[in-house]
Amino acid sequence: MLQVSGLNFFYGESHILRDVDLTVPRGQMVCLIGRNGVGKTTMLNNIMGLLMPRTGDIQFDGRSVLRDSPDKRARMGIGYVPQGREIIPRLTVEENLIIGQEALGDRGQKSKEVPAEIFELFPVLETMLNRMGGDLSGGQQQQLAIARALMSQPQLLVLDEPTEGIQPSIILDIEAAVRRIIETRGISVLLVEQHLHFVRQADYYYAMQKGGIVASGSTSELSNAVIQEFLAV
Ligand SMILES: Nc1ncnc2c1ncn2[C@@H]1O[C@H](COP(=O)(O)OP(=O)(O)OP(=O)(O)O)[C@@H](O)[C@H]1O
């Protein structure tokens, strides 16, 4: 579904991403792990087209998207939930969700209503439809951000630390929802995450250090050494 090859990115003269290769197979969840500041968010922003690499390629569904704007990539079916969520505080929960359909492009029909499936995944949102986005708790905003991304029916969902600063019970809800999304929709997920429990839900991991991939494999084979080195357990 997504193939990144030989990616190099610079902020000015600082070499931030170094020859990164990463693949997200169709219908699978892949997790990118690494300490703060190694380049994970920079990597996701390159995938979304918010930053341009100096060299390398990014292919989505078999074709290069390097020349496509962020907006176009979203309309092609890459849904992004950025760090910090970017909920619109002065719009209601329902309005925030409806806006998510802007990225549908010509892949589907827009609707004036939020489909029931969204509330099955995130029941709390149904009870809060008329509340302002900015009045929700951090965990609720995170659920809203993921639900909003789903409104565009993405083929690939890109999540940047969805559990950052969120209380443990809601982390489990978010984990369960993401697992269910993959099972029911068959979509692919690329996740940046620090919580071991969530990382274990993924099929594959890539570990990043100083902008390069230094380890990768199946999460069923995650060693204690990798866990100690790359995750804030
Ligand atoms: N706008 C910028 N200009 C210059 N350097 C930047 C800029 N944004 C980030 N950096 C640097 O790029 C490196 C990678 O940052 P990035 O945010 O991608 O890391 P990260 O792994 O996502 O960390 P975190 O988990 O803290 O978000 C860091 O050293 C950071 O200081």
Image (cartoon, rainbow, N blue to C red):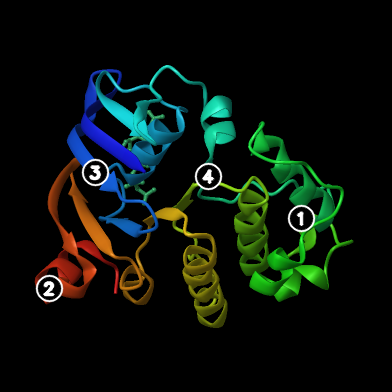
Pointer 1 residue: 134
Disc 2 residue type?
Ser
Work out whether 64 lies above or below 176.
above
Please, what secondary structure does the residue beneath circle 2 have?
A: loop
Q: CA distance from mark 2 to mark 1?
A: 40 Å
Residue at horizontal 79 percent and vertical 61 percent from the top:
135
x and y percentages locating residue 4 in the rendered image: 27, 35
Q: Which mark is residue 223?
A: 2
Q: Are marks 3 and 4 in contact (CB under 8 Å)?
A: no
Q: CA distance from mark 3 to mark 4?
A: 17 Å
Quadrant location of the C terminus?
bottom left
Quadrant location of the N terminus?
top left
Disc 1 residue type?
Gly
Residue at horizontal 58 percent and vertical 27 percent from the top:
71
Given residues 87 and 66, the one toward you in this image is 66
Quadrant in which residue 177 is drawn: bottom right
Q: CA distance from mark 4 to mark 1?
A: 19 Å
Pointer 4 residue: 80
Of circles 4 and 1, which is in front?
4
Which mark is first along the chain, 1 or 4?
4
Work out whether 133 lies above or below 47.
below
Q: CA distance from mark 2 to mark 3?
A: 20 Å
Please, what secondary structure does the residue beneath circle 1 have?
A: helix
Quadrant in which residue 61 is drawn: top left
| Quadrant position of ligand 1 | top left
Which mark is first along the chain, 3 or 2?
3
Which mark is first along the chain, 1 or 2?
1
Which mark is first along the chain, 4 or 2?
4
Mark 2, ligand 1, within 8 Å: the answer is no
Which mark is first along the chain, 4 or 3?
3
